[in-house]
Amino acid sequence: MNGKLIFSIAKALMLARWKQTLIAAIGVTFSITMFVTLLGFMNGLNDLLDNLILNRTPHIRLYNEVKPTKIQPIDKDKSFKKSYNFVQSVKPNGGRLEIYDNASVLKALEKDSRVLGFSPKITTQVFYNVGAIDLVGAINGIDVEAENRLFAFKDYVTAGNFLDLKIIPNSIILGKIAAQKMLAEIGDVIQVTTPKGERMQLKVVGYFESGLQEVDKVQSYASIVTTQKLLGKTTNYITDIQVKLKDMTKAPDLAKEYANLFNIDAIDIQTANAQFETGSSIRTLISFAVGITLLIVAGFGIYNILNMMIFEKMDSIAILKATGFSGQEVKNVFILIGLAIGVVGGLFGLIFGFIFSVIIDNLPFITAAMPTVTTFPVNYDIKFYVIGTIFSIITTYLAGYFPAKKASKIDPVIIIRGK
């Protein structure tokens, strides 16, 4: 049978009940709109939360952990070689935090094609001396340019210039809350004391805000050179090496490889942030589930409308079959109606979904916890639009298929005789 004729019949049936057809199309449009908008917003929120943690976290951290020696003196005694030795309350042996022969480690990382970049770092506990009060804090000695290149350091410096750490000797960028507790303004000089009693005066050149108050109340940043001077260490002293990989998924395997190769402790980003990643995955799963549920509900609406259309158009279907239309051709008519509703409704849904996403993306979102964020986050990933399109077509096809199958089995003789 001529496809053009089937199309014209489907068009006539849709126009004959244009109000119901319009309602079905609006249902699909609403579902696709909410699907795209919801997933874009939820994944934008996930990206924002991920960036707060993961952007500031190396894929692999190399360091020396202070821990008790595994082999105790009793284990070396030959007379106890065949015995099981239990030593309680073992204490660390005072091992150094410094990474030994770090120059060769950095050189090996530089040659590794799997590594995107690395940044040496020194972490040390300090006390901020505020009059007669000492506030607990921590200083991170960083390679300023490497830290900015790999971890977007300048995005979290909300006042001052991050490059001043490199240019100005004995300078510090304070966590915003720590600065507020000390009433320290940019340009002021503060005094810090290390746990071993070394004291140093540092000039405040900026404020740092990570969005995590517990971090910003203690953490501050200085250059590696300044931190080495504060601790009274040589220029080759570092306690951490932060590594960024080209493929983050390889971090667990590479962390084990580096730990064995360099005889050092290594922790990967998946292990360090397992709970956080689980939360992001669950939020994404929930948003997908809600969106797909909306599409299925719209499909039931189309199914009901086509069922009613078949019931009211029994005479027309009987005439079609009596004039030579096969059951398959009648089925194609109603499947075409369902697909037309799905395609048109889905197309408008994608358009409105994008418009609503843009509107949300431009709504002001100002919070003290996230100073670098000014509007609500939205993810415009093309896969949300592709998934929405595919589901709208599949859902409306199935919604049209079952009523169409029913219509194809109608016996025209029974219908005409009944009339």
Image: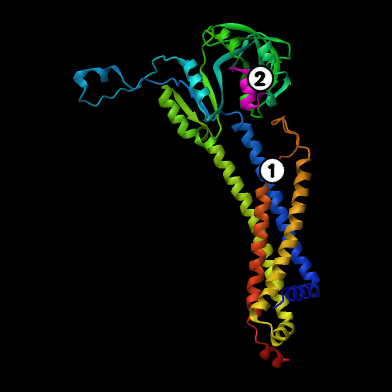
Q: Nearer the viewer, residue 233 or 115?
A: 115
List the single residue furthest toward the bottom.
417
Q: Nearer the viewer, residue 35 or 256?
A: 256
- Indicate the quadrant containing the C terminus: top left, top right, bottom left or bottom right: bottom right
Q: Is residue 58 above or below residue 105?
A: below
- The secondary structure that dominates the magenta segment is helix
Locate residue 378: give its quadrant.
top right
Question: Residue 302, how many percent across, how many down?
Answer: 70, 68
The answer to whether residue 152 is left or right of residue 19 is: left
Q: Nearer the viewer, residue 36 or 257?
A: 257
Q: Nearer the viewer, residue 330 or 80?
A: 330
Q: Are marks 2 and 1 in contact (CB under 8 Å)?
A: no
> How busy is the neighbourhood of tag 1: few (under 14 within 10 Å), some, or many (20 plus)?
many
Alpha carbon of mark 2 to alpha carbon of mark 1: how far? 33 Å
Q: Examine the rendering and report whether any part of residue 300 can be seen.
A: yes
Q: What residue do we see at 52% from left, 37% from top?
A: 249
Q: Check residue 136 for magenta coloring.
A: no
Question: Residue 272, how many percent across, how many down?
Answer: 51, 32
Q: Examine the rendering and report whether any part of residue 216 can be seen.
A: no
What amino acid type is highlighted by mark number 1?
Asn
Q: Secondary structure at mark 1?
A: loop
Q: Check residue 143 for magenta coloring.
A: yes
The answer to whether residue 281 is left or right of residue 361 is: left
Q: Is residue 11 above or below residue 128?
A: below
Question: Residue 36, how many percent across, how many down?
Answer: 70, 51
What are the residue bounds of the magenta stretch? 139-153
Dot 2 or dot 1: first in sequence order is 2
Q: Can you identify the residue that label 2 sits on? A: 178
Locate residue 310: give its quadrant.
bottom right
> How busy is the neighbourhood of tag 2: few (under 14 within 10 Å), some, or many (20 plus)?
many
